[in-house]
Amino acid sequence: MLDHVTLRVRDLAATRRFYIAALAPLGYTVGYEGVHDGAGVLGFAGDSPAGAHIDTWFVDRTAPLSGPTHLCWRAETRADVDAFHAAALAAGGRNNGAPGLRPHYHAHYYGAFVIDPDGHNVEAVCHSAA
């Protein structure tokens, strides 16, 4: 089981603005902000069966940057996937796949993809039937 992921980013302030908007529909909030070893650190927490848990970290480092990579957050509903996509685009993300079924993954795979400020392909997915 994955506990958390950390990405190095160019501009932590831009990353913060983007992900506050994009992850809000999925129930994520800023769970930590601080400085470690001279670098800004930002953590996002989502609800889990055990309670809020920071599973997504961003570190303000110019070199080496991470990625580009792919990150995907699970959504409870298809409407949450739609809201993620709309919020991410409104926050400056670039469309990389509109919300919809991706039956080549499985029959109920409903996802949406956006390119974030650092070029990462970020996604929200709902695995439930409509």
Image (cartoon, rainbow, N blue to C red):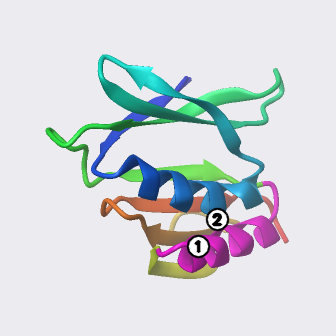
Front position among marks 1 and 2:
2
- The residue furthest left is 63
Name which quarter of the figure residue 53 lies in: top right
Name which quarter of the figure residue 60 lies in: top left
In the rendered image of this protein, does residue 54 appear above or below residue 44? Answer: above
Q: Are marks 1 and 2 in contact (CB under 8 Å)?
A: yes
Q: Secondary structure at mark 2?
A: loop
Residue 91 counted in the magenta span: yes
Q: Secondary structure at mark 1?
A: loop
Identified at 47% across, 60% down, the residue is: 122
* Local crowd size for mark 2, using a 10 Å CA cut-off: few (<14), some (14–19), many (≥20): some
Task: Report the quarter where the N terminus lies.
Answer: top right
Q: Is residue 47 left or right of residue 1?
A: right
Residue position for label 1: 103
In the rendered image of this protein, does residue 14 appear above or below residue 4? Answer: below
Identified at 83% across, 27% down, the residue is: 49
Q: CA distance from mark 1 to mark 2?
A: 6 Å
Q: Is residue 12 left or right of residue 104?
A: left
As drawn, the label of residue 71 is none
Residue 86 counted in the magenta span: yes
Q: Amino acid at mark 1?
A: Pro
- The residue furthest top is 37
Task: Report the quarter where the C terminus lies.
Answer: bottom right
13 or 7: nearer the eye?
Answer: 13
As drawn, the label of residue 109 is 2
Magenta part of the protein: which range?
A: 76-92
Whether residue 41 can be seen here: yes
In the rendered image of this protein, does residue 9 appear above or below residue 125? Answer: above
Q: Position of residue 19 (x, y in %)?
A: 56, 55
